[in-house]
Amino acid sequence: KGLWNGDLIVFDSLPSTNRWALENIRLLNRGDVVRAVAQTAGYGRFGRMWFAEGNNSLSVSAVIKSEPHGDTDAHTLGPLAALAVRSVIERHGIPALVKWPNDVLVKSRKIAGILVEQESNNPGLVLGIGLNVNVPADVLSGIQLIHPATSMLIECRRVFDVELVCSDVVAELQATLNAEQTPGHFLEDWRKHDALSGREITVQTSEGTITGRYDGIETDGRLRLVDKRGKEHKLWSGDVLHKM
Ligand code: BT5
């Protein structure tokens, strides 16, 4: 099943579930979830690649139409999805943290990535989730990554049923999105599991680089940062660099 009684559409292989969902958005309904057992040309933010070949990864894209959430959806969906994935993997005994805007980290290693996209002229948002389920260590070390990565297999030394992980993620995502009908509901969970809490960070944005003290996130998903002069900045998007 998809979200909110939407359909779950499964392909053996697709270049990218996000791309497929965006191209077919008019045929899809709110809550439909597209899954590719193998994804051959997955991508992340700013056109970066996302590795999910073989059948060891969870690659899904959920169709979220504008209602019942407000127009800040695109910026809160990433953090909400990161929290949902985080709690699913923690239930399997893997302690994990979230990093703004959309990463899930286990001991500073990236285990999941999230990508929210919107086609212009369409109220539909596509929420893509990639999770390293059974990806072996030698496969991850063989690909060029900016940050170190891990998988559920590496952390637990056992193989998981990707289909079951998929239904857990969809169910948890649904619960998280429903709870957010009270805007800001997610902030308490975010604060408890925030990898950046109390850190000096540098954020690369399209307008330049800002360094300062991380000060949490806003209800609308913006990152708060206080620079050396004490000035507060609220950022919609960017890449966070930090010392762990
Ligand atoms: C992301 O981008 O983390 C978002 C990834 C979203 C993937 C899903 S899978 C389903 C859907 N269909 C798609 O085509 N995409 C979505 P970003 O924050 O830009 O991080 C990308 C960086 O993560 C890359 O530059 C790599 O360094 C690293 N990376 C790539 N594959 C990885 C993997 N499997 N595990 C950990 N890190 C990875």
Image: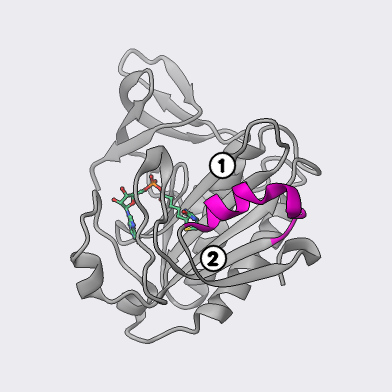
Query: For the residue with label 2, is its CB less than 8 Å from the closest atom of ligand 1?
Result: no
Name which residue lies at 66% across and 33% down. 72
Disc 2 packing (10 Å; few <14; some 14–19; many ≥20): many
Name which residue lies at 35% across and 60% down. 51
Q: Nearer the viewer, residue 54 or 71?
A: 54
Viewer-side label of 1, 2: 1
Disc 1 packing (10 Å; few <14; some 14–19; many ≥20): some
Asked whether residue 6 is drawn in magenta, I would say no
Which three-letter amino acid code belongs to the residue tagged 2? Ser
Q: How many marks?
A: 2
Residue 5 occupies which quadrant of the picture? bottom right
Q: Earlier in the sequence, mark 1 or mark 2?
A: 2
Q: Nearer the viewer, residue 22 or 236?
A: 22
Query: For the residue with label 1, is its CB less than 8 Å from the closest atom of ligand 1?
Result: no
48 lies above or below 27 = above
Looking at the picture, the colour scheme in use is one colour
User: Picture coordinates of residue 135 (x, y %)?
Assistant: 33, 74
Looking at the image, do the residues carrying marks 1 and 2 touch, with CB atoms under 8 Å apart?
Answer: no
Which three-letter amino acid code belongs to the residue tagged 1? Glu
Give the side of residue 166 with respect to residue 102, left or right.
right
Q: Which mark is residue 117?
A: 1
Residue 61 occupies which quadrant of the picture? bottom right
Reading the image, the residue beneath label 2 is 87
User: Picture coordinates of residue 164 (x, y %)?
Assistant: 57, 80
- Spatial distance from mark 1 to mark 2, Cα to Cα? 23 Å
Give the side of residue 219 with respect to residue 201, left or right.
right
- In which quadrant will I find the N terminus? bottom right
Q: Which stretch is magenta?
A: 16-32
Q: Secondary structure at mark 1?
A: strand
